[in-house]
Amino acid sequence: TRTPVNVTVTGAAGQIGYSLLFRIAAGHLLGPDVPVKLRLLEITPALKAAEGTAMELDDCAFPLLRGIEITDDLKTAFDGSNVALLVGAMPRKAGMERGDLLSANGGIFKPQGRAINDHAADDIRVLVVGNPANTNGLIAASNAPDVPKTRFSAMTRLDHNRAVAQLAKKTGAAVTEISNLTIWGNHSATQYPDIFHAKVGGKNAAELVNDQAWLENDFIPTVAKRGAAIIEARGLSSAASAASAALDHVRTWFHGTAEGDWTSMGIVSDGSYGVPEGLVSSFPVTTKDGDYQIVQGLELDAFSRERVDASVAELVSERDEVAKLGLV
Ligand code: NDP
């Protein structure tokens, strides 16, 4: 039998945690034959709620779940961790300046990066979900100097999945017929969902759709502002879809993208496509066995270039702000 994989989830008592943990325990993160041990990190006041979730996890009698530890201590949470899902973050409250938001999250992601550096297993892989995810990822990676930067990622898979769903709807295709879609840039309203290289049933998506007005006025804003639309409709932010995307992200990272296809991940830029080195930005990547490679050589026309640049400019300004705060 296999040794269990240690999976750390922060913000475990939150909404996303409540969707995520049951599916991890059911085998949807790493596969149906991989046992897992869960480490749930929460802030002290939320420990009791996390215990409630853990009681329900026990009550599911998941065959793959080999243990649950609940803690507010970083060392305990990340000790020997193989996969860390950093979900807990400081939400933006009304009237909060962006600098305040970044500084509050620096207080969370700087010590977590340090704890990952000092205590996680040698094969650690990190996914940041908590917003602002790209810059939180940058903070965590910057504070883990002994961990290769390629082990840190930020989630744009939900944006990717949203874009796949919208494109499927527009073309009447099944989601499984859509490939090679890319989210570029920041997980924010400036993100750029790119269909110019995407395919629908093997045909170029942009040519098939052939509707620039839809692309500009419908598709791009619908994908970029989907989170707000869900809050408006549900009265709560999206949680199950975010959890599902986090599972997709990690599963694809380990199990690989299909031949000829790619996925979108926020990763530390190596300078590809003119994205300044070191920024955590979303790129088209192929994956295999927990490693990724940026897809090279895609042509970006003026329309795409302008949008990628705008989102990257936002990432630059977030980075400058956290640099000023001494967080990176
Ligand atoms: P959620 O579980 O709904 O969300 C958690 C984080 O994920 C937020 O930063 C949220 O950003 C982000 N997120 C990313 N993508 C999405 C998406 N598509 N839809 C919704 N959220 C998304 O938040 P809760 O408030 O329910 O729970 C957070 C938990 O984290 C709390 O239990 C809190 O105690 C805990 N926490 C733990 C910390 C720790 O372990 N050290 C530190 C801070 C908090 P956004 O706010 O922009 O929606």
Image (spheres, grey):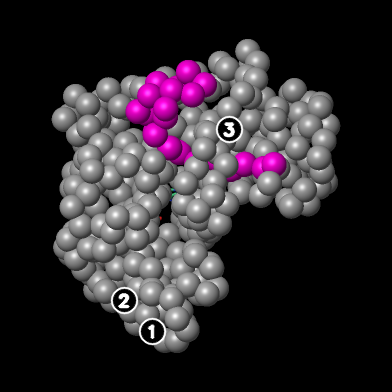
Which mark is in front, 2 or 1?
2
Q: Nearer the viewer, residue 219 or 120?
A: 120
| Left or right, residue 328 beside residue 281 | left
Task: Pick the quarter of the image with the N terminus.
Answer: bottom left
Helix, strand or loop for disc 2 = strand
Name the residue tied to disc 1. Answer: 58
Instruction: Please state the total of marks drawn on the protein image.
Output: 3
The spot of residue 274 in percent (x, y) is 48, 18
Residue 295, numbered circle: 3
* Crowdedness near tag 2: few (<14), some (14–19) or many (≥20) residues, C-alpha within 10 Å: some
Is 120 rendered above or below residue 101?
A: below
* Crowdedness near tag 1: few (<14), some (14–19) or many (≥20) residues, C-alpha within 10 Å: some
Look at 16% across and 30% down and name the residue there.
326
Question: In the rendered structure, does residue 276 fall within the stretch colored magenta?
Answer: yes
Of callouts 2 and 1, which one flags the residue occurring earlier in the amino acid sequence?
1
Question: In the rendered structure, does residue 48 fall within the stretch colored magenta?
Answer: no
Q: Which residues are magenta?
A: 260-280
Of callouts 2 and 3, which one flags the residue occurring earlier in the amino acid sequence?
2
Helix, strand or loop for disc 1 = helix
| Left or right, residue 153 beside residue 94 | right
Name the residue tied to disc 2. Answer: 68
Q: Amino acid at mark 3?
A: Val
Q: Residue 32, located in which quarter of the rendered image?
A: bottom right
Look at 82% across and 35% down and name the residue there.
203
Look at 63% across and 24% down and name the residue there.
298
Whether the residue carrying mark 2 lies under 8 Å from ligand 1 is answered with no
Q: Residue furthest top?
A: 302
